[in-house]
Amino acid sequence: MSSPLWTYRMALGAAVAALTVATALAGTVGPGDVEIVDDSAIPASLTGVAGDPVAGKDVFTGRKLGNCLACHQVSSLMDEQQFHGEVAPPLDGVADRYSEGELRLQVVNSKVINEDTLMPAFYRVEGLNRVNEKFEGKTILTAQQVEDVVAYLQTLKE
Amino acid sequence: MMKKTVGLGVAASVVLAGGLAVAELREGYVYFEPSSEEHPLDEIISGREFRDDATRALQEDDFENPGFLSLEEGEELWSTVDGSENKSCESCHGDVAEGMAGVGSTYPKLMAQGGKTTLTNIENQINTCRTERMGAEAYKYDKPQLTGLTVLIKNVDRGEPVNVSTEGDYESWFKKGEELYYTRVGQLDMSCAHCHEEHYGEYIRADHLSQGQTNGFPTYRFKWQGMGSLHRRFSGCMKNIRGVPYAKGSDEFLALELYTAWRGQGLPVETPSVRN
């Protein structure tokens, strides 16, 4: 089974796979390397790829993704999504109140701003307790999903 | 629907027979005074009050309430001989209504178990009786037999105010439960308090957040299409926030059971309750 040739092929395959992943993620900032400025904003994109507000809306509403409506309300989504939560502030006009960088920090880790908040940090893996193994070491959203949600939030103007 | 506003107009005020809590009726919902000055809440509300009229009516109807099927199973087992000692529960405790009076409202309690004193809930105590007195095998947690007997015993105290001990030797368990209550867990990084202390009465999507009171357990839950223990509910909450639950019957969940029971000190026992 494990002939030298087979082992060599496996190693080569793994190396190629690792290289592919590295290429795809080039320019993506890992959850431990996000640069927060003045504890108030993350001005730089996590991926360098512009966020897509249409994809961001799906991430925002997806119950297995952002599930943002579990807690927040958005008037413009009332018709298509029932039962908006009420434990967190409405997000109507949120783009008028916060800059892109401030919105990004809110999504990445809002505990930097308010350590008591119940809002999960969507791009963080450190400092968590008893994480289910299915989610261990993983962020709730990918870097690009964060960028897409931020792009969607920027459309919420009054 | 109900919000955590205080003083909406007092319609009635009642002192319970136990004398522990003062119940108040506001807009048709029953509120209780906290049991002590140190209590983190300024009003104590059973999970019943957060459910709709139909659910509450179902709970109150002993013929329709599906929890009574579980109680009947417990009733049957109470007098069924099992194990090497040829005993049933009834052999030692007699009639359940007399033998178990004052049990359901005061557990979890410190009891001798396997030669040491430890915090024990009704489920664990039933299994201690089975293994140490009856020579029978322990029931697995949340098996219908164990739930049925637990429902039967707790139901004896239905209407009695929850009255657990928290002082003396109980204090370390209480503190441990309190710490767990406020500890963030899981990928979603939330504690019990985030939903059940800070946001009860509000909605998370279509879910109406309660205070997480425990006076109705074991409960019939629509979501489960069946009965479940308090530890099953704890476990479900921890999974919802993408955490690793503690084991049912574990010291951690027992400590949390004691602490959460204290948060509802004075609420009437409702077992078997009906919930969403």
Image (cartoon, helix red, strand yellow):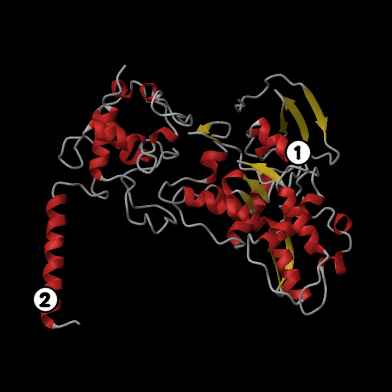
Left of B127 or right of it: where is A67? left
Measuring 78% from the left and 43% from the top, which residue is drawn there? B62
User: For the residue labelled by badge 2, is the local secondary structure a helix, a strand or a loop?
Assistant: helix
Q: Amino acid at mark 2?
A: Tyr
Percent of width and height locating residue B95: 88, 59
Between residue B65 and residue B21, name the one nearer to us.
B65
Q: CA distance from mark 2 to mark 1?
A: 71 Å
Measuring 28% from the left and 31% from the top, which residue is drawn there? A102
Pointer 1 chain: B
A88 over B95 or under it: above or below? above
Pointer 2 chain: A
Percent of width and height locating residue A46: 21, 42
**On residue A67, which mark appears?**
none
Quick check: can you spot residue B16? yes
Quick check: can you spot residue B43? no
Name the residue beneath numbered marker 1. B60
Q: Quadrant of the N terminus of chain B?
A: top right
Percent of width and height locating residue A62: 36, 38
Measuring 61% from the left and 62% from the top, which residue is drawn there? B251
Name the residue beneath numbered marker 2. A8
User: For the residue labelled by badge 1, is the local secondary structure a helix, a strand or a loop?
Assistant: helix
Measuring 19% from the left and 38% from the top, which residue is drawn there? A45
Left of B256 or right of it: where is A3? left
